[in-house]
Amino acid sequence: MKLWLWIVAAVFVVAAGAAGFVYLNPNAVMMLVVQMSKPHVEPNHEVAWARGPDEAMQGERPPNIVLILADDMGYNDITFNGGGIAGGAVPTPNIDSIGRDGVAFLNGYDGNATCAPSRAAIMTGRYPTRFGFEFTPAPVAFQKKVGTEHAQDDFVLPQFFADRVKDMPQGTTEGAAAVNNLAVPVSEIMIPNVLKAKGYHTIHFGKWHIGGGPGTRPEEKGFDESLGFMSGGSMYLPENDPDVVNSKQDWDPIDKFLWPSLTYAVQFNGSERFAPNGYMTDYLTDEAVNAIKANRNRPFFMYFAPNAIHTPLQAPKADYDALPQIKDHRLRVYGAMARNLDRNIGRILQALKEEGLEKNTLVIFSSDNGGAGYIGLPDVNKPYRGWKATFFEGGIHSPFFMRWPATLPSNTRYPFPVAHVDIFATAAAAAGASTPADRVIDGVNLLPYILGKNPERPHQNLYWRSGQYKTVLDGDWKLQSSEAIKRVWLFDLAHDPTEQHDLSAAEPERVKTMLATLASLDGQMVKPLWPSLLQGPEFIDHPSNVAQKKGEDYIIWDN
């Protein structure tokens, strides 16, 4: 055969093989494209924090405000309530101290059951559905992977709505950074906007995940300085770093997407991406301590939002080695991550103390949502049912503490339901600022309630929505509706706080009334800024590494 025929034959074979690979492995090809589109990352370089005055201001000084938001931390991931990871094998004394030395909200609720809408609720004091930020921004490739992969024996399958991609906003589907254009509208007023107007220096650390396009980055939404990442996640260290211990969940499509797609990088005030100097949570804390020292003589607002303890599960080797009593590798990595986070929160508290700022600093601690079922650990939200992405208590009932020694009582447990939307108005009141009068603010200033000046409940109703899945709290009664499966649950949380007994069949009139309340609240909201591309089942009583079982409760989650 002539040479040119051999070349044509070889090209044909390679092309046919490539076509066959694409046909048989579309997800693998998709992930290869995602990995190849990762941005360039520069070497680490020093961050120069703007310095405040050399001398402290004269007269009465408004409090510093430090908001610490953990990522995917379950109710049972701290030892404050007597539990903790691996039966209490991982103490969290520093996080616990915020609740012990201040106010612990026994019924503290998240803004949403997933991270980005919850963060939007915190930053604005408004239900994110009021401004269309209903779903967590995620790349189309992610949505497709999660919406198509499932275990062989699953009988409730996820769905990816390919026909809806055409309805996504322009510029949000192509390229690695496109997802950052799915953002909270620029018209929304955020906590740092309000505090900056009162003379506060405002600083953001870590995860943002509520915008990265023009006008929506943290340094454009009221933060004077921002060190972190715009997307929903980051590597803690490079996968092959000698100082890291990894745990991969090979059954989980989310995990399989994150490992090849995430970068180990941060940005400072919109700079080019550069590598941190060490384990991500350690690095962010190092810089937070530096920023506290730089701003010791002026009032500041610090939003410290590490990605810990969200997947990918990566722990510092030293923290992993400190927990030999935990035999399960995944649980040990997870526990080591929590141990590291607690120690770093302790370093922030210690820096405040050393600079003489402890007494007049309002420290707020919470998690963006409950622990995730997709990490395969059954006890993260104990004693509550459900996981991240569900409106069962396990998905939205998180640790929620406030400490301000100069003003708030210590060792106080507040019983009535409060929510992330309350952080905005509470921080504004502490700073002597007013909340915007030109829009509905769903949160309230909690200070009069904590101090006993107002004996009423802060809220009669609280509300959550993610597409067709909706929930309302009315006093102590909670109703959930997953319309995709025509299922309603009704719980009396005063007598059944862990949602064991569905009373929907026994209380039809109450169901009817609460569905009407849901409909009324829905009528106040706006359409989502972009469509849900994904619906997936979340089984309530077991993590996702356990096989689906007939007759068990599940909801359908939209994103």
Image (cartoon, rainbow, N blue to C red):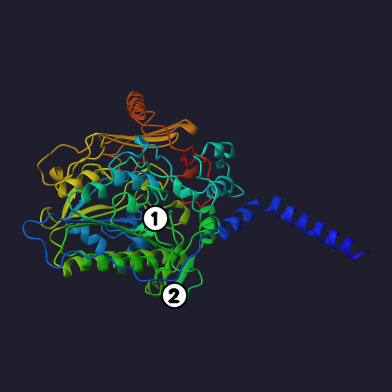
Amino acid type of disc 2? Asp
Q: Position of residue 179 (x, y in %)?
A: 48, 48
- The numbered disc on residue 379 is 1
- The numbered disc on residue 243 is 2
Q: Which of 104 and 519 is in front in this view?
A: 519
Q: Position of residue 499 (x, y in %)?
A: 35, 41
- Determine whether 198 is above or below 360 in the image: above
Q: Position of residue 328 (x, y in %)?
A: 46, 66
Image point (89%, 60%), residue name: 5
Q: Can residue 385 be seen in this view?
A: no
Image point (39%, 58%), residue name: 270
Mark earlier in primary sequence (2, 1): 2
Q: Give residue 147's quadrant in the image.
A: top right
Q: Nearer the viewer, residue 6 or 450?
A: 6
Q: Nearer the viewer, residue 26 or 172?
A: 172
Q: Distance between the residues labelled 2 and 1?
A: 27 Å
